[in-house]
Amino acid sequence: MKNKIHFSFLFSILLLSSTVFAQSAPGFKVRIDSLLNSLETNNKAMVSVTIRQNSQVVYSRTTGFIDNTGKTPIKSTPETRYRIGSISKMFTSVMILQLVEEKKLSLETPLSKFFNKVPNADSITIADLLNHHSGLYNFTNSEDYPKWMTEPRSRKQMMDLIEGQKPAFEPHQKGEYSNTNFVLLGYIIEDITGKSYQENLTKRITAKIGLKNTLCGGKINHAANEASSFDFTDGKWVMNPETDMSIPGGAGSVISTTPDLASFITALFEGKLMSESSLKSMTTIKDGYGLGIFKVPFYERSAFSHNGGIDGFSSSLGYFPDDKTSIAFCSNGLNYAMNDILIGLLSSYFNKPYTIPDFKTISLPAEKLMSYEGEYTSEQLPLVITVKHDGDKLTAQATGQPAFPLETISETEFRFSQAGIVMIFNKTTSGEIDGFTLKQGADYIFKKVAKP
């Protein structure tokens, strides 16, 4: 129920329980294959997945295609490069912490040392940028951002934009995600070293640990096995426009493969990229934020991770320290919630209860669908959701959001797979629809207040 998110993190809270600790389960490859087969067959996802344990790849598979404009789609391979969005922030954080180790700056260095025209620059520190406590407005939230995101932007243009924005809040008050923080950090890396972000990425990370397919992206090149991204619209995969990669910089400009990503985060936790004390700083959580990283629970485990989204790309990279296991996920087309796919992957790997979703739908007559139409409100959320009948389907539209189509699962259950939304309608004793329960991570009760 959100507008498309551009190279921002897509934070996933998974499952928390007190189940007995266990390593990967026998037969997990078959279970993961079954999940990916079902997703591909039902046009729910095109993905690449790599899992490493103890520095060894134990699972790797890719589905889908990188381009469908020719007579025959160009299929994805394990070496396909995806735009990874905000996972780029982990690379930026590593390079910043390396510069701290080299005493070329500190976590307490004020932003004003580099950009004194940015609002509150004297009060904002490098640490504030890394853990999203700066209060700087997230420029990708601007209403006009979708109008210019495909156009090249110079550093001066980006700085003029950042310097002219009113802060969202005063520094240190709270943690609130902002891509602006990491665009600035990318520029700081360049200013301190006198080298481009790409040159630093190569010297400080990719060449050091042998990554062959991780670099700053440009215009997508299918000949170089770089994927375009797609939305599933009107029964087919439709290619998305491309964000110009001059914009995201240290916040989201990196492209990579899942084997490279799994190697990167494994090397990070094995101490090959920074000292133990720097890693401890990076993984210390304040108000839910580490230094370019998050901590996410899954049953009795916890992973350090970051997600990303840019255009139609979605990605996730996580490391479970107790299991020495990393999982890298990239998608260039989702018609199903990424968090639900991650739960399926991890449940299959760690032998947790999981049933591959049934994507079957049914058809209801128009007169039946019309009975669901109306405006619905909730005491739990400040939203009005308008449900309408459109042909043989229902659509739902929340306040300030575009309408989205609902799949019909039963006479009372409808689903929007891309966002992991399920709406279960309630009937009165006389058979009239008087509300629904919206399930998306939690349950929200909505009551019908008016017909549209």
Image: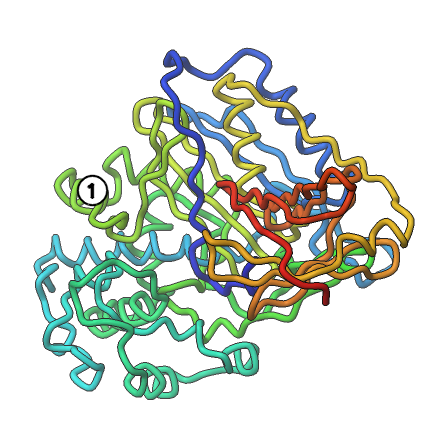
Question: Callout 1, which amino acid?
Answer: Leu
Can you tell which quarter of the image residue 276 is in? top left
The quadrant in which the C terminus is found is: bottom right
Tell whether 142 sits left or right of 103.
right
Residue 147 visible, this orientation: yes
Tell whether 82 sits left or right of 386.
left
Can you tell which quarter of the image residue 210 is in? top left
Q: Residue furthest front?
A: 430
Question: What is the basis of the colouring in this image?
Answer: rainbow
User: In the displayed structure, would residue 282 be above or below residue 228?
Assistant: above
Query: Residue 390 in the image: x percent, y percent?
Result: 82, 61
Tell whether 308 sits left or right of 32.
left
User: In the displayed structure, would residue 192 be above or below residue 350?
Assistant: below
Residue drawn at (44%, 72%) of the image = 140
Query: Residue 174 in the image: x percent, y percent?
Result: 22, 59
Q: What residue does disc 1 label?
A: 279
- Label 1: element kind: helix
Residue drawn at (49%, 41%) of the image = 442
User: In the displayed structure, would residue 144 be above or below residue 251?
Assistant: below
Residue drawn at (70%, 59%) of the image = 387
Residue 398 versus residue 276: which sits nearer the camera?
398
Query: Residue 342 in the image: x percent, y percent?
Result: 53, 36
Residue 307 versus residue 337: which sits nearer the camera?
337
The quadrant in which the N terminus is found is: bottom right
